[in-house]
Image: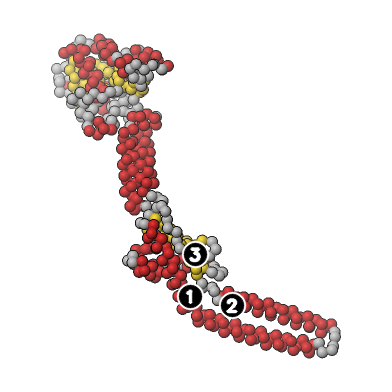
Amino acid sequence: MIGQVLRGRWRTLVVLALLGALVGAGSSVILSPGYRTTSNVLLQGPREADELLTQAEVATSSVVLDRAAAVLGRGSGADLRDRVSTTVAQGNVITIAATDDSAEHAQQVADQVAQEFVKYSTQVLASTGDAAVKVAQERRETLRQQVAQTNQRITELAEKVSDGTTSVETVQLRTELAALRSSIEQAMSTLNATDTTSGGLGSMVVMGAAERPTSAAAPTLPQLALGGAALFFVIGLLGHLFAARTDRRLRDEEEIGAALGGPVLATVDIPDVADESDPGAGRSLRAKLLGDDKPWNIRRIDVTPDEIDGDVHYRRLVSRLPQRRLLVLVAEGDHAARTAATRIAELAGRRFTVVTVAPARPVVEDHSAEGVLVVLGLGTRTAWELVGVAEACADAGPAVVGAALIRPVRPTRTPGAKPGKQAEKDREALAGTP
């Protein structure tokens, strides 16, 4: 069925794809971010996870963005807020990403924001950390003095204990004093290491300049245009399949006959060719360009158009009709049925008159006819439309003597081409049609 939709509605699907491409290209103005690049800032020293997240928020603060915008001459920081974002990477690294309409501007924004972030963070740490660092240094110096006094006292006690007397208690005491001295020395080493590390806690380094992007970041204009075309194409394809699934137009001969209140006298296969010479066809410009006024699920047979002889079936149909004046009723827009009705009227002579009615509100004005032959394309009308046609005929007086169903087929072989294996079966099927 998908292949039938592609063959029968390829023009409509192409138009939908072009429309989707235009919509996708238009949406690139909003959705396409432009060029994107990143700059990395390294925070030296041990850092907590919460501290890294705080520093990432500082990088996109209004103060940092305002300073960067002032240096770049890009207005205010609010103009950069939607173009700058930050993430925390592994290894105490904060990544600053910048997007802009050009690769050069994106690189400049990323570099400038990184530099202003480092400057601002350094200033904040210097202004708020001087007093705390001074107090901490004083406390550590006091602690060192106390440790020195304690070591001196331990030395004195050790000398008194070891003044010529030897006992179990003195040996145990000297051992405990030595262990205490070792613990104090280890604590002092840790304190000195902490003091050295804390001296560089607030340092930050920009890890090189941002790379200039060579191509726009996704989604780009071609990607959006291609995605829009594919989306609209799939929507159109699924729409045709859904419409076919929910189609209520009748295709069964018994159901059509029951709706009209008369028997189906013949089902005639005719080639699906456009009759441009028919002034009553009334095809719109859209129908001529897209061909959407014909069913897409037309049967395909392996014969040439010349091998489909509809006149034989029309003559059989005329011979089965009563020798009375009949109206040949055709619905508006049913081009295949109108072509067939015109040919039937020509073969029958003056006894038949072709009348076109609106399927939505059918009205039969000829009250002198002795019967009505309804000619309609197979699968073109719903049951309610056919019931309306039958009621219009009953209101006018003439009864429905029968119906002729026209089934458009699409020959797949050109004249002179070698017939395939299916050709004989198709010709037999056509020959056996009433």
Earlier sequence position, callout 3 versus callout 1? 1
To which residue does mark 2 refer? Answer: 195
Residue type of the residue flagged with mark 3: Met
Q: Position of residue 307 (x, y in %)?
A: 32, 15
Q: Whole-Å distance between the Cαs marked 3 and 2?
A: 26 Å
Residue 400 visible somewhere in the drawing: no
Residue where numbered disc 3 is placed: 207
Name the disc covering residue 254, or none: none
Image side of residue 65 versus residue 383, left or right: right
Q: Residues within 10 Å of mark 2 (few under 14, many from 20)?
A: some
Residue linked to disc 1: 125
Nearest-to-viewer mark from 3 and 1: 3
Depth order, front residue of 283/217: 217
| 8, above or below 26, in the image | above
Q: Is residue 257 above or below residue 218?
A: above
Secondary structure category for the residue under label 1: helix
Q: Give the camera-side residue of 92 and 384.
A: 92
